[in-house]
Image (spheres, rainbow, N blue to C red):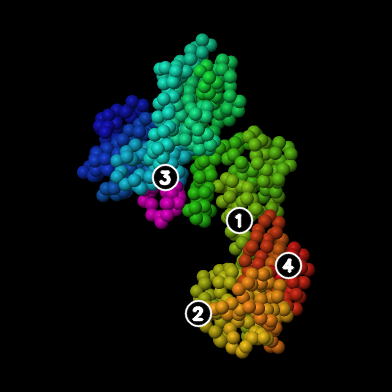
Amino acid sequence: MLRQYELIDRVLDYDPQADEALLNRAYVFSMKAHGSQLRASGDPYFSHPIEVAGILTDLHLDAETIATAILHDTIEDTVATPDEIQRMFGDNVARMVDGVTKLSKIEAQSESERAAENLRKFLLAMSDDIRVLLVKLADRLHNMRTLHHIGSEEKRRRIARETMDIYAPLAERIGMYEFMKEMQTLAFRELEPAAYDSITRRLDALKTEGGGDRIARIGSGIRLLLSRNGIEAEVSGREKHPYSIWKKMAERHISFEQLSDIMAFRVIVRSTEDCYKALGTIHQRWPMVPGRFKDYISTPKRNGYRSLHTAVIQAENMRVEIQIRSEDMHAQAEYGLAAHWAYKQAGKAADPHVGWIRDLVEILETADSPEELLEHTRMAMYQDRIFAFTPKGELIQLPKGATPVDFAYDVHTDLGDQAVGAKINGRVVPLRTVIENGDQVQILRSKAQTPQPAWLNFAITGKARAAIRRYVRHKERDERQALGRKLYDEIVSRLPAQLGARALDQALKRLKITDEAALMEAIAQQTVTDAQVMEALMPGSTGGDVGGDVAPQQKSAISIKGLTPGVAFALASCCHPVPGDRIVGVRRPGHDIQVHAIDCSALVDGSDADWVDLGWGDKADGGVARLSIVVRNEPGVLGVVAGIIGAHKANIVNLRLDNRDTGFHTNIVDLEVHDAAHLMRILAALRAAEVVSSAERV
């Protein structure tokens, strides 16, 4: 464990103006607060925050961040209070300690919910100050280094899986690749111990093939080549870390021996100009592997990463990966936003590289469930990036596989909402077209356009999907309310007297429904019945009780010819026969007789049943028929449909959306009708309506 003076000396080495008194107060306060607490390893608990602070000194972070690391567990694990931290260490440190503490107080029922809630708090905290994220990543890294001391295998695997799913990708996303690699390696060792041992043994054998250290031998060759061509460079080599190798083997379905780029070398030069000189020199000496060159200097990654990547077939007939970058690029590459913070932020969190954080925070406001949130955030963190340009030349970075819809929402939400098409490289294309690297994209828009549910089939960014889902939810709510209003007016028309001015307010209280809009939705969704609404509006109008589950009433009792009086029967729900249909009874042992229409498809499977020839009685009046109605995807169409049905004195007892695409929606509607002739008249009227594409009996 670092001693007090050792930690402070580390900070003063890179920041002579650091607040030494702040660091001393934090060290002493944390040591006293944690007292005799022990970690699973048996070490004093106080050693953990000090080691976390030590990790952050390697990133050259400011004194407030180091103090936060020293204090980050005091509120959660000791009697220290937020007010005490604020009084002794100031507002900034208190806010950051509180932000880190929030990430640890997680209460969830399932693993996915736990991970999503963790991520939610993580993003909200770091959107306020990116240093909170840096402290938490260092905290997780040290916990992973000491993971083997935890006795419970289940707990170790849970922590490792969480690290692999959330913390390592976050470290990668902000460019902290060294943190990412170590987290992945430690988590991989816990989650796949056999695979980890196998790969590390093979790597050890590979390094010594051909006698001596192969990595040192190849690295010396690269350094000598550059020196002979007047390029001063620092060259270092390493094998890929075990998890990276295992992931490639799994993705490509190949063996360890078939991997061609296990070794990677880093060339660090003085300037951007030297980067390109070194690249040319290397390509002149060794053949380049086609398709493996990437220029992240001219088009940096979204997290600010800049470097040249190439792969060549080296003299020992091995494919090796080479990264070429300047010293400044290297600092950014190793520690990403941490390096950027240390040298340029000076206390401000508004950095162009954290735009993706703002996007994810926006998604927090629209995600319906923890699973939906996790879907969006994993999309934003895991997917490879491509580069596209606006007509004005602005660079837009998107996940691989993105479409113009994703592009439009990345530019602005309003542009996404109004997109009707796109031009890619001057050619008009559908919105589902996949954007390629380097495409110029122009969004065609119309104020009359609205987000379409079908876009969810090809939009892949969390920001686009969240905006589309938000609009669809609002639209469906408006349509339900419009339908409910039509049905409500019909219900009111059946009351025996005109309603008073306060009748609706009283009805809402009786039904325990919050407001008029909620009542209209309840009516449309059939969560309250017509009879319940009538009784609530005008008690005694139905002879019923508003508090009970009142089933929709048939217009009169149904009588069936051909059955012995008193024999129980039921109208089959598969074909919904109504008076006027030719019907047959199906009798199975131990069941009531089921009355089917003669052309019902369920009658095909009648091997174990007796058939009874039936007919409708003289007084048979009323039945429930099921319709499939395809309507245009336009505002108000359900109101038109409800109006037609109401004009024919029929009652909607159930309605559900069966299928949705860009142009049309298919709705399944159950209707109370007098008989088959009544039903045919309704179908004819529906088919005549302009907004109805088709109407058929199911």
- Whole-number angstrom distance, CA of label 4 to CA of label 1: 27 Å
Discs 3, 4 touching: Cβ within 8 Å: no
Residue at the spot of label 3: 162
Image quadrant containing the C terminus: bottom right
Discs 3, 2 touching: Cβ within 8 Å: no
- Label 2 SS: loop
x, y percentage for residue 502? 56, 79
Q: Is residue 107 magenta?
A: yes
Residue at the spot of label 2: 547
- Residue at 52%, 16% in the rendered image: 315
Give the mark nearer the N terminus: 2 vs 1.
Answer: 1
Residue at the spot of label 4: 695
Where residue 433 sits, quadrant-wise, is top right
Does the magenta stretch mainly form a helix, a strand or a loop? Answer: helix
Q: Residues within 10 Å of mark 4 (few under 14, many from 20)?
A: many
Query: Which residue type does callout 2 highlight?
Result: Gly
Farthest residue toward the left? 36
Q: Is residue 283 left or right of residue 121?
A: right
Q: Residues within 10 Å of mark 2 (few under 14, many from 20)?
A: few
Residue at the spot of label 1: 471
